[in-house]
Image (tube, rainbow, N blue to C red):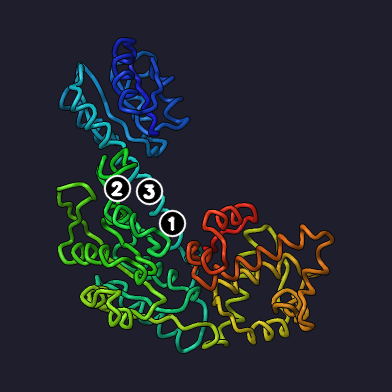
Amino acid sequence: MPTVLIADDEPAIRRTLREILEFEGYGVEEAADGDEALDKAREGVDLVLLDIKMPKRDGMEVLQALHDAESTVPVVMISGHGTVETAVEATQLGAVDFLEKPPDLNRLLVTVRGALDRGQLQVENTRLKQVVRDQSGASDLTPIVGDSPAIARIQQTVARVAPSEARVLITGEPGTGKELVARHLHAQSSRADGPLVEVNCAAIPSELIESELFGHEKGAFTGATKQRIGKFEQADGGTLFLDEIGDMSLDAQAKVLRALQESRITRVGGDRSIPVDVRVVAATNRDLLQRVDENRFREDLYHRISVILVHVPPLRERRGDIPGIAEFILGQVMRRNGMEGKSFSDDALDALRRQEWRGNVRELRNVVERLLILSDGDQISAEDVDRYVVPGGASGAPVGLIDRYDTLFEFRDQAEKLFIERKLDENDWNVSHTAELIGIQRSHLYNKLKDLGIERPE
């Protein structure tokens, strides 16, 4: 439930606005002067209704302080003494709207809803832009590691295609790094200062995918208690990454096709056409042409999204890249865990190169983290790989786990964690599909993820 801060020195105004907003289902905080308003705005609210004339600090001073602090909370100015000059100054300092006292009820509610939606979108875009800025830096954007001919082709293709507006379809098995290629396409494009919005189409129930992509209006369906901004609008001016697009329903495919053709979307339950400026990058581990033949994927959508095709091969087809990737991941994991000084022996890297890696880079990341934590000494050896990586070890039994734990409960938890991580890797972290394959309910699997501390690798 969004919380609105009413900052006004007139108790009658605060009381009236509180009654209106609480009736509409909003949470309400009050402030009677500028200092109190600034403190409560900093503590965390979703919207500020800010009077201009207040004791201690006036509204413009509070707005200036929020602007200087780079606050993302939306502010609507209210005043009985407004002038054009004041309204312009307030807008320049980031105010999203300006209301005159006494505010018209309908205008007030429309303004509040619009400001909250804009605030939600601004927070999301700010977060996404920060991710983009972090990834765009040479030290923070994970490189596409490897010197195999396949990786060289991918790097060359990204460099040539990224500056264009061409839509790109990235194919490859689960865990090969399709998301990383998409991030590089965005970071090297002219849209790098805009948001990169990622949508895992396989992880969203089919009945919710349209709302997720296009947003919905309040009351559009049961549970739609407020307006929601969809991913297409969030990605306006940037890149929309549709991961696992092959799992999208045919109805949703039709609407995505229309959005790509017209560069416009309509929210679920709405009748207004909204223009969007979005570059779409899609990815899939499916054979989309086969799904076209099976009438499970629209051929016209396939041609729309596959102007440029980029295939990311599995690790077993580029084993020479495995040592470099493993060493890069080891450095990342050590820094994240505050651990330094470990390295791989040459024999350990050879042992890693010989593994099958059905989960590809994602599985390799989990394994490297496991080796870092469980291995003794400053160097990870081939014996550590045999003990902690090869299922069952050389003797056919999970020797490393047996030696490591003294109680059945500790052993069981670790064994369950390894099993679930492996199955999630094999199914590209599609929780619903994985739960079905391993024979438990989806809610039970979610509980397991939480209890065992399992998180999807970045």
Toward which corner of the image does residue 302 lie, by quadrant?
Answer: bottom left
Q: Which mark is residue 229?
A: 2
Toward which corner of the image does residue 277 lie, by quadrant?
Answer: bottom left
> Who's the residue at 26% across and 40% down the image?
219
> In this picture, is 203 found above or below 30?
below
Instruction: State the CA–CA distance, disc 2 to disc 1.
Output: 20 Å
Q: Label 1 sits on what residue type?
A: Val
Q: Label 3 sits on what residue type?
A: Glu
Element assignment for label 1: helix
Which sits in the foreground, 359 or 45?
359
Q: Which mark is residue 158?
A: none
Q: Which residue is mark 1?
A: 131
Toward which corner of the image does residue 217 lie, by quadrant?
Answer: top left
Q: Which mark is residue 124?
A: 3
Query: Which is nearer the N-term, disc 2 or disc 1?
Result: 1
Instruction: State the CA–CA distance, disc 1 to disc 3.
Output: 11 Å
> In this picture, is 354 found above or below 10?
below
Residue 346 % position (x, y): 71, 84
Q: Label 2 sits on what residue type?
A: Ile
- Direction from residue 5 to residue 425 in the image, left or right: right
The quadrant the N terminus occupies is: top left
Which numbered disc, 2 or 1, marks the residue closer to the eye?
2
> Who's the residue at 76% across and 74% down the image?
398
Q: Badge 2 local density, few (<14 within 10 Å), some, or many (20+)?
A: many
Residue 74 % position (x, y): 33, 35
Instruction: State the CA–CA distance, disc 3 to disc 2.
Output: 10 Å
> Who's the residue at 36% across and 58% down the image?
197
Residue 347 % position (x, y): 73, 85
